[in-house]
Image: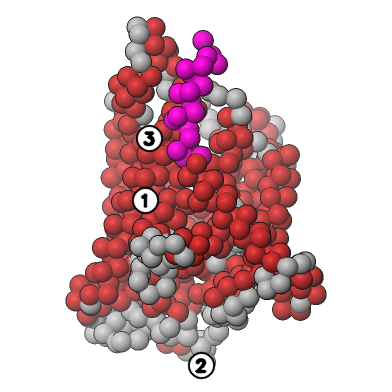
Amino acid sequence: MPTYRPGPVSLILAVLVALFLLMPLLAVIPVSLTPSRMLTMPTGELSLRHYRSLIEDPRWLDSILLSLRIGVVSSVFSTVLALTFSLGVWMFQPRFTAALVGFVLLPMVVPPVVSAVTLYFLLTSISGVTSFFGYDTWLGVAMAHSVMTVPFATVLILVALSQLDRRIDLAARGLGATVWERATRVIIPNIKFGIVTAALLSFVLSWEEIGVTLFITSVNAITLPRLMWMGLRDNIDPAIAALSVILIVITVLVLAVRSLVTRQRSAS
Amino acid sequence: MRGTLSDRMGAALLMAPLLLFLVLAYAWPFLGVVKWSFTLPTPGLEQYHALLTDDLVQSVFIRTLRIAAIVTIVSVTAAYAITVVWVRGSPVQRVLAEFCILVPFWISVLTRAFGWVALLSNRGLINTWLQSIGFISEPLTLVRNEFGVIVGMSHFLIPFAVFPLASAMRSLDERVLLAARGLGSSRMRTFWTVFVPMTRSGIIGSAMITFVFSLGFFVTPAILGGGRSVMIAELIYLRIFQSPDWGLGAAISVVLVVFVGALMALLFRYVKPKQLV
């Protein structure tokens, strides 16, 4: 059967766009190998000193650990909230579902800068009550990140549920399973992949989050993107290039593994 | 069975935690921001009046709309070109296109903006290369201006512009295209008179998403604009952390939300939410 394939003009244009998309990612590689302390192209000699400074400078390590902690806590929190909410929607199909889901998705559609001002208001208000949780604390950042990631987790889990066959739940119900048993022994095992994806996406979004983080931290809760931001604004530190190369390599590896896993899942 | 008392209890118990969390951590503080806009520094409509009269605020609004419009056109056009290959290309072409779309999509906005700094700055890749081949003697100013902002924002938004287009191109009936070709229409003509019109909903969705996203953009303009081409989001940041003028920052935020809300309402009159993913 003949198929409609893109012609030569389309292919050339697509290649140009592909180059545009990949160019800045490739550009950081030579910069990361410069022996200079400034952001320049290496001339002749190559050096790994900026990679070494990532390990040796405690600021980088501290912020990586902080970002990991915030990412894990906020990802678990938002995945659990998204899961219970989505189970409620799917199992009971209550009235006003559309409006409630719309409300939950708000942090995803409202311009991030407005969410940032909102969360700044929230955390500075909390800071007036307790210094342990609020503006510029890691718990405050984790909570703010949960607000921002929970819509994405909810969408992914709702999509996973929409592909689930309702009859298996009806069968469990007909056989006398309680709500708890239906949820934990029938529904959740069948959407495991969706839940894991939701948790992973929440983690990645928190790990990369900068727009909101800038508004709610100053000197104590310096996450990795926050530290990169400081390095980018003041005088550009080539250690950021080394870090970028590492992050890009990790992303490419994770995407490759994920596409292999999805391929196997669809094959089996 | 539906709607019994225990069912309603179950639904309420399962849905309450998230709803409660977002009411307390999002809806309530947003109302607080709205309150700021009417009460700081003194109660009244003064901040909204300033929005309409202040020259700086006006010029930032106009610049933001202009950049958002240019970025939308660039991103949707570029996204269209690569989506055609992602959806309709040969299997190998599809994998390659997918790689080029998804890798940047998953990489953080900071890393990507930094990549553009490395390429475009005075001692960056492009200027170094152009000087070494003797094409220019003085470095070109490619960042810390509107050009850099547009390049960086388009780069960020192309993957987002791809998804609605891909969804429209996938749902299109291929036989119509083959029929046009079979009736003797050239590739170009088939593309412009059949393919493009049939993906209209995707184009509208893609343009709306790009435009809405670019209105609230913060990181890329702040890094690539270098404080010279300030957009709305950066102005809000400056008003809250540098001036500090919380009332005006809050008022701009409120106006931005209302504007984006109106655009979204307009969007959903033409496109169903499902067509956007």
Report which residue position mark 2 lands on. B137
Q: Which circle marks residue A74 in the picture?
A: 1
Q: Are marks 2 and 1 on the same chain?
A: no
Coloring scheme used = secondary structure
Q: Nearer the viewer, residue A171 or B172?
A: A171
> Where, by quadrant of the figure, is residue B77 drawn?
bottom right
Bounds of the magenta segment: B1-19
Residue linked to disc 3: A194
| Residue B266 place in picture, x, y as percent | 74, 45
User: With A169 as the anchor, is B45 left or right in this view?
Assistant: right
Q: Helix, strand or loop at disc 2?
A: loop
Q: CA distance from mark 3 to mark 2?
A: 55 Å
B273 in magenta: no
Give A124 or B81, whichever is nearer the viewer: A124
Q: Residue at x 65, y 64 (%)?
A: B36
Dot 1 lies on which element?
helix
Q: Crowdedness of circle 1 by 10 Å Cα count: few (<14), some, many (20+)?
A: many
Which residue is pictured at 45% across the width and 29% down the height?
B13
Horizontal side, residue A116 vs residue B48: left or right: left
Q: CA distance from mark 2 to mark 1?
A: 51 Å
- Contact (Cβ within 8 Å) of mark 2 with mark 1: no
Residue B191 in view = no
